[in-house]
Amino acid sequence: MKQNSKLKAFILDDDTLILKIIASFLTDYASEKGCGIAIRSITDPIEALAELESQGDRYDLIILDVRISAISGSDIYATMLSTYPRLSQKTLFSTGYSHELSARFPDQQLRIIEKPFRYEQFVRSIHPIIG
């Protein structure tokens, strides 16, 4: 991330506490890097899918929870792969169920951070995506 630039992040998680923690981590990261931050946090997977289909290209980082009601983060990812494959390079899964992802997407280079995680782990996970 270049100094004076603005990081645009998208987060989907059905747990509002997790959303707040990730948003806080992203804000701290942006502050450390001397860049701005714009965060879109969503708890509803249907709304998230619509947002990514219409606005996905505007995000530098997409963070998806895996186990969510209605449509899972992995279902959203599968849709992205088939219709917007370039978004997969921007995606980080935040989950306690990484084995499910690996089984569902055996040919994909997935970026996964296991819950619970600390700030240092989070930074190491997002760095390959946003630099």
Image: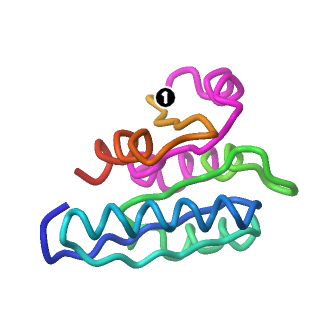
Q: Secondary structure at mark 1?
A: loop
Label 1 Cα crowd, 10 Å radius (few <14 / some 14-19 / many 20+): few
Is 5 contained in the magenta span? no
Q: Position of residue 2 (x, y in %)?
A: 13, 65
In-front residue for pair 40/21: 21
The residue that mark 1 highlights is: 108
Circle 1: residue type: Gln
Q: Which residue lies at the image location 35% right of the left edge and 76% below the top edge? A: 37
74 vs 14, left or right, is left
54 vs 86, left or right, is right
Q: Which residue lies at the image location 60% right of the left edge and 52% below the top edge? A: 64
Above or below, 81 relative to 61: above
Q: Which quarter of the picture shows residue 120? A: top left
Is 98 contained in the magenta span? yes
Q: Which residue lies at the image location 80% right of the left edge and 54% below the top edge? A: 71
Q: Which quarter of the image is occupied by the N terminus?
A: bottom left
The residue range painted magenta reads 78-107
Q: Which quarter of the picture shows residue 95? A: top right
Above or below, 6 relative to 9: below
21 vs 34, left or right, is right
Q: Position of residue 91 (x, y in %)?
A: 47, 49
Q: Position of residue 9 (x, y in %)?
A: 44, 67
In-front residue for pair 23/39: 23
52 vs 61, left or right, is right
Q: How is the image coloured?
A: rainbow
The majority secondary structure of the magenta stretch comes to helix
Q: Position of residue 58 (x, y in %)?
A: 38, 73
